Amino acid sequence: MTQTAVPNPIIYVPVSSQPKQLFLLLHGASSNPGQLESLTQAIKRAFPQALIILPYGTVSDSQDGYSWFDLSGLDESNYIERVQAALPALIAYIQQVQAKYGLTGEHTALAGFDHGATIALEASLAQPDLAGRVLAFSGCYAQLPGMAPPATTLHFLHGTDDPFIPVADIRSLHGHLADLQGDATLDIASGVGHEMHEALVEQAVVRLQTCIPLRSWQEALGSLKEQGPAADDDLDLDFDDEPGKPGPTLH
């Protein structure tokens, strides 16, 4: 492992106004923020008032590659420990950015690919008010969670041909989160491997723009119950979890 200084995060600040959203994008193992260029550009187009930050992994392990924890000697016996050790510094950094720009977890989305997805998922579980959304591309938790994050909507985006994390495992995780009363969606792209595929990036933006968090529905329903029964045409409870027409490779 090379001892190279880790570069400062890449930061995109909206020039015309105070940021209204915060997106923190986490690259995969032995990579760098350039891996997430397509996602960065998609978010910039869809959310022009967003602050977008792409930090580098804290461990330099190749000429242009960085990871979120040491990969040398990594195995099942130390994987969870190394992931957990990487969380406090990242959580503290996100909280500092939120405080600086007057943003909260409700304004914050974490997105990650591969190990970056794992870090994002585990961070939102360790600090429940950290982010309102997590986009997990080709990634999962370090270990099966015993609870679902109470204030976070999780969006899993995966390929059927991922050789590192079988799609069956992601389907099982999605079902497990449902059993825990978690708020999670799952989009799967046919013929896609372990990659930031355009179809998944586009679907991630659709999810961000159209998916209403389960907690918002629960709060609204609770308020309506307190007000008494509504007329039939006042409330449509038939919420479609698959907004819009999906692309041809998604199911």
Image: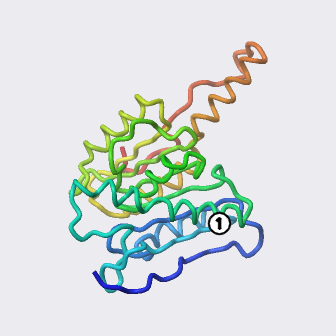
Q: Amino acid at mark 1?
A: Val
- Of 68 and 48, nearer the camera is 68
- Of 164 and 206, nearer the camera is 164
User: Residue drawn 26% across and 50% down?
Assistant: 160
Quarter of the view holding residue 216: top right
User: Residue drawn 59% across and 48% down?
Assistant: 132
Residue 126 visible somewhere in the drawing: yes
Q: Is residue 226 above or below residue 147?
A: above
Residue that carries the numbered disc 1 in the rendered image: 97
- Tell me residue 100's x, y (percent): 71, 67
Secondary structure of residue under mark 1: helix
Q: Residues within 10 Å of mark 1 (few under 14, many from 20)?
A: some
> Position of 5 compared to 230: left or right?
left
Q: Is residue 98 above or below residue 235?
A: below
> Position of 1 compared to 9: left or right?
left
- Tell me residue 99's x, y (percent): 70, 62
User: Residue drawn 53% across and 51% down?
Assistant: 206
Q: How many marks?
A: 1
Quarter of the view holding residue 20: bottom right
Quarter of the view holding residue 76: bottom left
- Tell me residue 18's x, y (percent): 76, 67
> Position of 251 compared to 237: left or right?
left
